[in-house]
Image: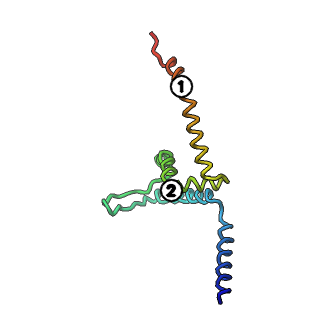
Amino acid sequence: MDSSKPAKQHSFLNGVESLCNKLPQPAIIFMFLFVYIAVLSLILSLLHVSVVNPSDQQTIAVQNFFSVQGLYWFLDNMVTNFTSFPPLAGLLFLAAGKHPIAGMICGYAASQAGFAAMLGIPAGPGITIFMPAG
């Protein structure tokens, strides 16, 4: 009996692995979910769907991602969404075939190199360009 239990576990894990191998990359899954939510928000906003917040009884209407306000909201909050959920950035690096730690090191090195390059250059031309004549 003991030998059949590990065999069942092994076959179950093989089944899970083969099922997961059929899934697309995590970045593609996130893209599909975004498109699904955006289309759903379009449909629900056209139907004028709203909900009531139970904490303050305020009515909240569904906002359309494809509207001008929705696009502004998306662009304003894009960086916050990525920086407030660090595992997402790691998944995007893994989906691109890069190691997340290497990405963080490269990002840190690039920001420090950019900062070091800006120490002396902008001060000279900025003063000469924006000095008032007279």
- Residue, disc 2: 42
- Residue, disc 1: 122
* Chain-order first, disc 1 or disc 2: 2
User: Would residue 77 appear left or right of 51 to someone viewing this image?
Assistant: right
Check disc 1 and give the amino acid type: Pro
Label 2 environment density (alpha carbons within 10 Å; few <14, some 14–19, many ≥20): some
Mark 1 lies on a secondary structure that is: loop
- Determine which quarter of the picture holds residue 113: top right
Q: Position of residue 93 (x, y in %)?
A: 62, 52
The residues bearing labels 1 and 2 have C-alpha atoms spaced at a distance of 45 Å
User: Would residue 67 appear left or right of 25 to someone viewing this image?
Assistant: left
Q: Nearer the viewer, residue 66 or 25?
A: 25
Q: Is residue 4 above or below residue 78?
A: below
Q: Position of residue 62 (x, y in %)?
A: 44, 57
Q: Nearer the viewer, residue 127 or 43?
A: 127
- Which is more foreground, mark 1 or mark 2? 1
Residue lying at the far left in this picture: please name it.
56
